[in-house]
């Protein structure tokens, strides 16, 4: 913080009305009148007794936070704010990854409504959860991720702690890395979800990037990815998107996953999965977990942050988990105990409501099956708007530009390949809101709007550089 | 390094002990004895020994769940706007000039703990003084929260074991010796664990001293309404500091007074010198929150907002809250009477003098261990008992245990 002497030139003391305790002696009745605000930087100064001088060190009437600057809006969440402020009727919000129906309405899953009604009927209490969260939630969550009959679970080698959705779970893992793997780096894909770097920065965990997106192919730079993972110091944490990579929508193939696992094993790196879209990528919960299960089956220890924001539409309930697959039950017990120690000074114990919803849906065979059906509908709608967007662009664009990457990409997002200027054009001219990295959320696109979006993309790509 | 089974990258991770407070419940749950008593964590119990969900909370929750127009979209990073405004009014008063002048930024956080952590992280980044003074003793989690946020923790004298009351001179001396600008943690009411609060006159002296030294108040308000039974009365210490025009931080929790424990509902307010500063401060709070959990959980905050904004529900709440506070006060009297009746050695009047959910019994760690082993009574080793966990049925058991402990263990 800049330091400096604060001086004020004040009017004569008779027109000053200072808080009573400046005057010394017994407290006077009545409220103090404030001096005019002053703009200063730097340290506060202790009040001086004399206030007849025209220049004085004034302690009280300057904010201690005066030098704080205005932080920029969040690049992702800020998009929705800008969208809300736009009055144009053609506006389209393709910013944040929140699922919308064909009518562009938010969607609360039927199974979630059913679960909440059940919970209400049972009249459950609101007692504190244990620090590690709801036991029944933790159980079904690990099973959902790894498969209910996974030997790892039967051998009690998985430490699962309920966390505040994906972000909170990543943060707990980051705190664990900082404390127990001092100096270890996290390797983050280039690009990745914007908040990843913030999480590791705030947790004081160093990170570097591995090549991922190849703009020339609008595909995976697999050789670059492998080379960068190989080049990293042994024992690094490699942050991998379990499926439906955010923001690109580009996932490794099963064969590529095997090679990635080989390299990670060779270098004694620790795989660190971010699983925010299980079920949303292909429509199948099991298929979308195959990358994680592949690594786990090799006997590797791994970290997996899970979120139910998208696949159960529980965005605002903040429900997720951090799973640590360990080489022994003893290690899992110890690791879990240390994660608890990190959660306690952050929020003590996690919120119960979302956890109960998940436990009820995932833990009940009937509701679980219904969920799978709703999941397929949501993933299906996204696949169909991908197709429609592609078809509209194909029809419009006779330049030979290949838009088929839209069909190859998977999950909620598409990385259009548009640069910042082109993305700005999308917003400024076409009122299409997206993030500056060229990412659009297909979850926010309706069939009806595909044509319009195709026009906007075509214009931005060909007419703006 | 992990290359398969056997080796673990976590080999150097030792098993952490259970949290000293929450671990009491863990131990209690393991105890097979039918006559056990959990006086550990501060969660209210009915006369029947059961957890309580307030009627008004149930009603609000029903309204929300049955409202088909409600969605589960992400809240803003700062949380539910309505909840934030209502929380500020609750603690600062509906007519608070600080609110009217837009000098207050209020952000929804995860109960008291989350509010303290976000406030501490903010101060560690943006405030020039990184020392926080906490009372001796204080809630066990306080030093952990502040230390992990990057603040350095010092203590000020607070509790006097001799008088079982406030060491007021010690408090004043220690705050007077603090460096100018240091942060000072204050329990707004119903000090945890001692139940010993300053009088209004003492609060005024504390305020004057702190303002003259430029010490920054950081209030922890976890028991508003639970101490005296009156929401306004329990907010007086905070309001006294706000009405002098100065700045402060306030962490608010709805865990106890609305029984929202597991929903994690709370708020952090920062009262600033000007509206412009408040806006900038809020923007920086968002940068603390986003990499921690992105945005807060909606359920509990919606329930609280529903109640606070409806005058009938609000009134119902105050009645239910007073009933809880009154039951605790009656347990204090009953326990005191029971010890008197047994002729238990010592002066037990502190039981009825202390305020809020807890009694700082004055029992030492050996006596506590004795009570747990012989009588299956679970409490924290500092001798703190949660009066909220007592009932008329269980008072005699506790009185017997205390009597035995002070008579046989030194």
Image (cartoon, rainbow, N blue to C red):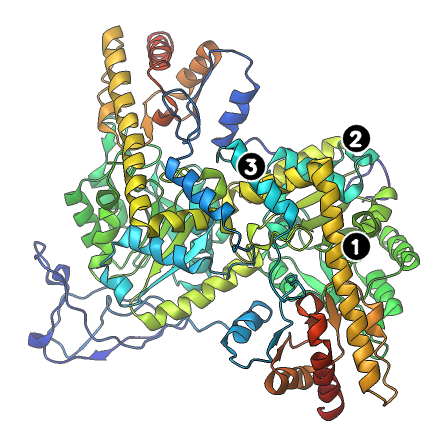
Helix, strand or loop for disc 3 = helix
Does the CB distance between marks 3 and 1 fall below 8 Å? Answer: no
Of badges 1 and 2, the one in the foreground is: 1
Q: Quadrant of the N terminus of chain A?
A: bottom left
Q: Residue at x 53, y 34 (%)?
A: A121
Helix, strand or loop for disc 1 = loop
Q: Is residue B116 visible?
A: no
Q: Residue at x 85, y 90 (%)?
A: A399
Determine which of the numbered discs, if any, sits on residue A154 in the image. Answer: 2
Q: Do tags 3 and 2 sit on the same chain?
A: yes
* A57 versus B357 height, above or below: below
Q: Do tags 1 and 2 sit on the same chain?
A: yes
| Residue at mark 3: chain | A
Of badges 3 and 2, the one in the foreground is: 3
Earlier in the chain: of badge 3 and badge 1, it is: 3
**C-alpha distance separating marks 3 and 2:** 29 Å
Q: Quadrant of the C terminus of chain A?
A: bottom right
* A11 versus B245 height, above or below: below
Residue that badge 3 annotates: A119
Instruction: Give how far across and how far down residue B223 sits, in percent.
Output: 33, 40
**C-alpha distance separating marks 1 and 2:** 27 Å
Which of the pair A160/A172 is nearer the observer?
A160
Instruction: Give how far across and how far down residue A376 sits, in percent.
Output: 77, 54
Residue that badge 1 annotates: A283
Helix, strand or loop for disc 2 = helix
Q: Is residue B71 visible?
A: yes
């Amino acid at each position: 913080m800049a330091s400096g002497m604060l001086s004020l030139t004040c009017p004569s003391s008779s027109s000053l009305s200072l808080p009573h305790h400046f005057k010394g002696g017994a407290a006077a009745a009545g409220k103090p009148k404030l001096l005019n605000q002053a703009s200063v930087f730097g340290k506060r100064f202790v009040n001086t007794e004399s206030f007849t001088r025209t220049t004085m060190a004034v302690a009280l009437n300057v904010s201690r936070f005066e030098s704080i600057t205005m932080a920029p809006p969040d690049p992702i969440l800020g998009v929705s704010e800008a969208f809300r402020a736009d009055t144009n009727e053609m506006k389209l919000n393709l910013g944040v990854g929140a699922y919308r129906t064909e009518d562009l309405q938010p969607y609360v899953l039927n199974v979630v409504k059913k679960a909440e009604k059940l919970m209400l009927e049972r009249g459950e209490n609101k007692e504190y959860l244990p620090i590690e969260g709801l036991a029944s939630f933790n159980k079904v969550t690990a099973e959902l991720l790894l498969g209910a009959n996974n030997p790892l679970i039967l051998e009690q080698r998985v430490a699962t702690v309920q966390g505040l959705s994906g972000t909170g779970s990543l943060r707990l893992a980051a705190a664990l890395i900082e404390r127990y793997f001092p100096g270890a780096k996290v390797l983050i894909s280039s690009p990745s979800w914007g908040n990843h770097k913030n999480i590791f920065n705030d947790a004081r965990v160093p990170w570097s990037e591995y090549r991922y997106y190849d703009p020339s192919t609008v595909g995976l730079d697999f050789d670059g990815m492998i080379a960068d993972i190989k080049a990293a110091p042994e024992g690094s944490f490699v942050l991998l998107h379990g499926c439906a990579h955010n923001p690109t929508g580009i996932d490794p193939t099963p064969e590529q996953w095997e090679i990635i696992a080989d390299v990670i094993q060779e270098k004694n790196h620790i795989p660190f999965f971010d699983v925010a879209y299980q079920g949303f990528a292909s429509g199948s919960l099991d298929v979308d977990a195959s990358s994680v299960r592949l690594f786990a089956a090799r006997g590797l220890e791994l970290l997996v942050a899970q979120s139910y924001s998208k696949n159960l539409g529980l965005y605002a309930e903040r429900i997720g988990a951090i799973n640590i697959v360990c080489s022994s039950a003893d290690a899992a017990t110890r690791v879990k105990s240390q994660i608890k120690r990190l959660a306690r000074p952050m929020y003590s114990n996690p919120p119960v409501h979302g956890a109960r919803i998940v436990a009820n849906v995932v833990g009940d065979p009937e509701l679980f099956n219904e969920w799978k059906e709703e999941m397929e509908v949501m993933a299906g709608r996204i696949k169909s708007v991908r197709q429609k967007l592609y078809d509209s662009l194909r029809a419009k664009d006779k330049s030979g530009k290949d838009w088929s990457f839209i069909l190859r990409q998977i999950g909620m997002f598409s990385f259009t390949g548009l640069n910042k200027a082109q993305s700005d054009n999308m917003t400024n001219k076409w009122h299409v809101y997206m993030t500056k990295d060229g990412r659009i959320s297909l979850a926010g696109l309706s069939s009806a709007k595909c044509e319009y979006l195709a026009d906007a993309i075509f214009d931005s790509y060909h007419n703006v550089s | 390094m992990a290359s398969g089974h056997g080796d673990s990258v976590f080999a150097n991770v030792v098993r952490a002990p259970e949290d000293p407070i929450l671990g009491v419940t863990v131990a209690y749950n393991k105890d097979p004895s039918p006559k056990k008593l959990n006086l550990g964590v501060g969660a209210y119990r009915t006369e029947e020994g059961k957890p309580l969900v307030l009627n008004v909370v149930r009603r609000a929750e029903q309204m929300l769940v049955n409202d088909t127009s409600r969605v589960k979209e992400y809240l803003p990073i700062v949380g539910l706007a309505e909840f934030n405004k209502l929380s500020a009014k609750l603690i600062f008063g509906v007519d608070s000039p600080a609110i009217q002048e837009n000098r207050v930024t209020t952000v929804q956080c995860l109960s008291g703990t989350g509010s303290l952590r976000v406030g501490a992280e903010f101060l560690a980044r943006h405030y020039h003084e990184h020392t926080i003074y906490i009372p001796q003793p204080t809630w066990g989690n306080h030093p952990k929260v502040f230390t992990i946020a990057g603040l350095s923790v010092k203590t000020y004298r607070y509790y006097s074991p001799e008088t079982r009351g406030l060491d007021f001179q010690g408090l004043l001396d220690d705050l007077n010796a603090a460096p100018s600008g240091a942060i000072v943690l204050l329990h707004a009411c119903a000090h945890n664990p001692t139940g010993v609060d300053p009088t209004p006159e003492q609060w005024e002296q504390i305020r004057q001293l702190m303002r003259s030294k430029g010490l920054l108040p950081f209030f922890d308000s976890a028991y508003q309404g639970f101490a005296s039974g009156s929401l306004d009365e329990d907010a007086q210490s905070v309001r006294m500091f706000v009405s002098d025009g100065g700045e402060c931080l306030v962490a608010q929790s709805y865990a106890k007074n609305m029984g929202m424990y597991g929903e994690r509902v709370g708020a952090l307010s920062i009262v600033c010198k000007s509206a412009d500063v408040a806006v900038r401060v809020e923007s920086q709070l968002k940068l603390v929150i986003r990499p921690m959990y992105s945005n807060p959980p909606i359920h509990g905050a919606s329930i609280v907002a529903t109640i606070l904004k409806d005058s009938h529900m609000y009134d119902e709440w105050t009645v239910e809250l007073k009933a809880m506070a009154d039951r605790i006060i009656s347990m204090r009297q009953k326990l005191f009477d029971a010890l008197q009746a047994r002729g238990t050695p010592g002066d037990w009047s502190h039981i009825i003098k202390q305020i809020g959910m807890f009694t700082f019994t004055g029992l030492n760690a050996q006596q506590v261990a004795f009570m747990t082993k012989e009588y299956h009574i679970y409490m924290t080793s500092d001798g703190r008992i949660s009066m909220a966990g007592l009932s008329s049925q269980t008072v005699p058991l506790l009185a017997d245990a205390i009597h035995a402990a002070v008579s046989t263990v030194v």
